[in-house]
Image (cartoon, grey):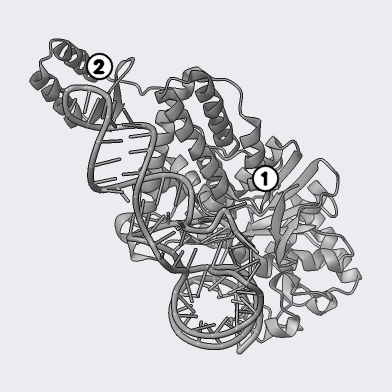
Amino acid sequence: MISLYDTARGQVAPLKLRDPGRVSMYVCGPTVYGPPHIGHGRQTLVYDILRRFLTWSGLEVTFVSNVTDIDDKIINRAADEDREWTEIATKCEAIWWKSMDSYNVLRPDHTPHATEYVEEMVDLIGALIAGGSAYVTTDGVYLRVSTVPDYGLLTNQNLDDLLEGGGERSLVGTEKESPADFVLWKFSKPGEPAWPSPWGEGRPGWHTECVVMSLDLLGEGFDLHTGGLDLVFPHHENERAQAVANGQRFARHWMHHGFVELEGEKMSKSLGNVKNLLDLAQLYDPRAYRLLILQSHYRSPIEVTDTSLNNAVAALGRLDSFARRAAALATESDPTTLSEFRSVMENDLDTAGAVDLMFRKVRETNSLLDSKDIEAAGIAAATALEIATVLGLELNAEGEVVPEEVAALVVRRTAARAAKDWAEADEIRDELTTAGWTVEDGAQGPVPRRL
RNA sequence: GCGCGGAUGCCCGAGCGGCCUAAGGGAGCGGCCUGCAAAGCCGUGAUUCGCGGGUUCAAAUCCCGCUCCGCGCUCCA
């Protein structure tokens, strides 16, 4: 079984499943008020890789990722642009999924929306009030954090430490009993979206939706709750607080991934301020970002720069040309390497180690091919290909679509070469270069490739 | 202030007590192949892992101190 760093315990621990053979995981999804940024990209890629791996290793995975479609940020943007908040949410969500598709991120099994769960949230809030863990003020309903005995578990701090913090706490909710208490239900101001509740019309606070939805779709004591490091506090802590206050068993295991850094000058200059995933996919092969993420550990910070992306693009070129050579060799994978791959991945999702293994098999294939050991090459190739697939890297074994002019030039060059007219052949190659193409003279004849 | 995590070759980035005279990718250099290239292959590159102590037969890996850096304690993947 895989071991992962558990934020609650502060150490790497085996993932103990509630139901053997089945994994239930919840990934905090996007608030749909703008285009997805590269941080969202890392998030979805990391958990996509985990999910693919778990599935490959024989587990039945239920993957839930929510969409926060009602939130202050959505309301604010709608107001700024004089549009309907629902329009913002709907459009941004469509863009989100489109972007996910371009990065080859598998769709979740369930994508609950906050607006679909308002009634259930109201029920939970009611129960919390009844149990003495929540109270009503003039602007909303708050959770009384002091009723949660181990509040601060995920940050490894107690309530007093948290209260002494240097952060600026929001002034909203000055009627709160304690600065640490957080809002479960916000009463709406005129013109704002509103749902009915026993305490007054309003909308749910952000931390409530994930508790209700995860518990509803995955049940109490589900296996894995994930998200970015920035969600540890307050979001995840507050989700947990509600479940605990309500006497419910929450996630058994907490997994958080590190940040993407792009503050460096490198980024802003050479990437032209690329911050969102849409732009990144325009400028680079989207697989490059996946490879980049794969090559570092999910908990380490990664700096996304023009250089690192270009490195990945070059590595991808190597993988694609491998895939082309390997296309005709399909055989069976080598079980030894595969089990090595498995144990590497089970070690706190060591994707870098997995990529390592994959590249070694790539080199092995090429090497065996050079020495004409086709059978062994086939096994090595199949192994590398299988690893790539599990990691969600789709290699391109197809040749490119060659425009007629380019094809014609290649034909002319082949003729010149046959006549040993090297000057002519090289001149044609220069013409190809100008047209953005190159030609590789392989054993099976010339292969045109885009530069 | 409290808490969490970093510092590894030209760049990115693994490793977490002996298999490390430190993976893998990118870039460079030398060679093979090629008419010349490209692709591919082979070789080459840190005697050293932020600094200073310590533990150990053995440390990049553990402990103590220090210096820088990132992050959280407020909305955020």
Which residue is depicted at the point 74% across and 77% down? A181
Instruction: Name the residue carrying label 1.
Output: A343
Which residue is depicted at the point 48% across and 45% down? A291
Tag in front: 2 or 1: 1
Looking at numbered disc 1 in the image, what kind of residue is underneath it?
Ser
| Residue A191 seen from this side | no
Expressed as whole percent of the image width and height from the top left, the position of residue A250 reads 82, 59
Of residues A137 and A120, the one drawn nearer to the viewer in this rendering: A120
Estimate how packed mark 2 is, as few (under 14), some (14 to 19) or many (20 or more) residues with alpha carbons within 10 Å: some
Task: Find numbered disc 2 in the image and state the secondary structure of the residue it sits on.
Answer: helix
Q: Chain of mark 2?
A: A
In this rendering, position of residue B26 left or right of residue A2: left
Of residues A299 and A44, the one drawn nearer to the viewer in this rendering: A299
Q: Does label 2 or label 1 sit earlier along the sequence? A: 1
Of residues A37 and A201, the one drawn nearer to the viewer in this rendering: A37
Q: Quadrant of the C terminus of chain A?
A: top left
In this rendering, position of residue A79 left or right of residue A186: left
Name above or below for residue A314 compared with residue A129: above
- State the mark number for residue A407: 2
Name above or below for residue A75 compared with residue A416: below
Looking at numbered disc 2 in the image, what kind of residue is underneath it?
Ala
Expressed as whole percent of the image width and height from the top left, the position of residue A400 reads 36, 24
Q: Residue A440 is drawn in which quadrant?
A: top left
Q: Are marks 2 and 1 on the same chain?
A: yes
In this rendering, position of residue A302 left or right of residue A105: left
